[in-house]
Image (cartoon, rainbow, N blue to C red):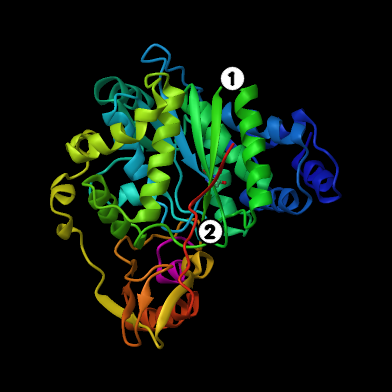
Amino acid sequence: MNILDIIENKKVGKELSDEEIEYFVQNYTNGKITDYQAAALIMAICINGMTQDEILALTMSMANSGDILDLSDISENIVDKHSTGGVGDKITLIVAPIVAALGIPVAKMSGRGLGITGGTADKLESIPGYNINISIDEFKQNIKDIGISLITQTMNLAPADKKIYALRDTISCTNSMPLIASSIMSKKIAAGAGSIVLDVTCGSGAFMNTKEDAKKLAKLMALIGKLAKRETVCVLTDMNEPLGYSVGNTVEVVEAIHALKGNMAEDVKDVVLNMCIQMMNLSGLYPNALDNKYKVMEVIENGKAFEKFRELVIRQGGDVSYIDNPEKFEKAPIIMPVLSEEDGYVEELDAGKVGKAGLELGIGRKQKEDPIDYRVGLIFNKKIGDEVEKGDVLAYIHANSPEKAMECVERIKDAYKIGDRKITKKNIIEII
Ligand code: URA
């Protein structure tokens, strides 16, 4: 077998065999297949798609590219969560400590930023000292000792996804259903949790722009979960507007800290509550579903969720003084307001346009090895449904140069649509 034949087969739209898929995954992971050959195959998959059988084979080969953890000796109730990606999506940083504070162990492997969507791994790394690359033994020990660990793909856990994910990010192959499903589910299967809750985003700031496509992706991942014997529930959420008030790395960590102390934007709260409730249901530890919402609010109000986040940060080497005093996070040198040019209501804040503006600011990567500037980002003063007057601050740009800030001002102005209708938005679309 050789990679050129495999690329050729996919290029002309043929179905790849399990052996061909396994050959590609193994040999790209071990470095025998080059980035440019892998890029050619990934692009062909992106264009020509994959059958269900191919997607299942790709997922299992990627999961098996490293260890598959068995966490059953730690707990039978471990639940994992994942989002298909979004702009301003800081949900993991809030949900994981809440659920862990409720006594449900959380073992989660997150990715870095992908395309216009941010990555939990990058956000965690913006906390000085936080180590997302701990060993598997430490990962397991953390779950045993404090009921939570948040890491990224490693050389032992889903290493194929680590490489394919970084490659896709820089060759415009992020919004492919087979590649998203195999990427997410290979990580979830490898991380060892018995049940999984997926936040499947849809809208201009998501990889799936329509509800129909998001549903298709959700059903595909639920099927993979079922075949891998992981109970999987999908929550379809809106991603036409960025989630919450911030987009970036440190700015989102700071928003998550406030959220864990009870100060949560309405859209964030909606998604957080729904994700927590589904995770509680799947854990088997909270049979009285009607109480779940109150239990979530309780661990926020009594400080246990925030304390769990502190514990996690300390445990993974982070400097907790930043969590206790978020003003310590280094700020970008330029902070520039975006002003409204008219009176009315915010009818649109286009997450896709915001995501592209953020990428230009340096929130994410254009090249695989690009460093990212954790300080840069966007803070929104006005969101959909808010009333504005001419001259009001719509948003603040946190940039590392005046040129980038000015360019971003124009992009953000273009993302807003001010009109005369007061719109109310639905954040949770469907549960599958
Ligand atoms: N999250 C992932 O882990 N992978 C994707 O491809 C998209 C979102």
Name the residue tied to disc 1.
229
Q: Quadrant of residue 362?
A: bottom left
**Along the line of sight, which residue is nearer the eye, 85 or 407?**
85
Q: Which residue is drawn at 54% across and 32% down?
A: 233
Q: Can residue 121 be seen in this view?
A: no
Q: Label 1 is placed on what type of residue?
A: Lys
Q: Which residue is drawn at 43% across and 13% down?
A: 72
Residue 87 position, x and y percent, is: 46, 58
Q: Label 2 is placed on what type of residue?
A: Gly
Q: In this view, does 44 lie to the left or right of 430?
A: right
Give the tally of numbered discs.
Answer: 2
Instruction: For marks 1 and 2, give the one nearer the viewer.
Output: 1
Residue 406 position, x and y percent, is: 38, 84
Q: Is residue 247 visible?
A: yes
User: Which corner quadrant of the figure contains ligand 1?
Assistant: top right
Judged from the image, the secondary structure of the residue bearing numbered disc 2 is loop
Q: Is 296 situated above or below 236? A: above
**Along the line of sight, which residue is nearer the eye, 429 or 326?**
429
The Cα atoms of the two marked residues, 1 and 2, are separated by 30 Å
Start and end of the magenta stretch?
357-365
Name the residue tied to disc 2.
115
Residue 270 position, x and y percent, is: 40, 48
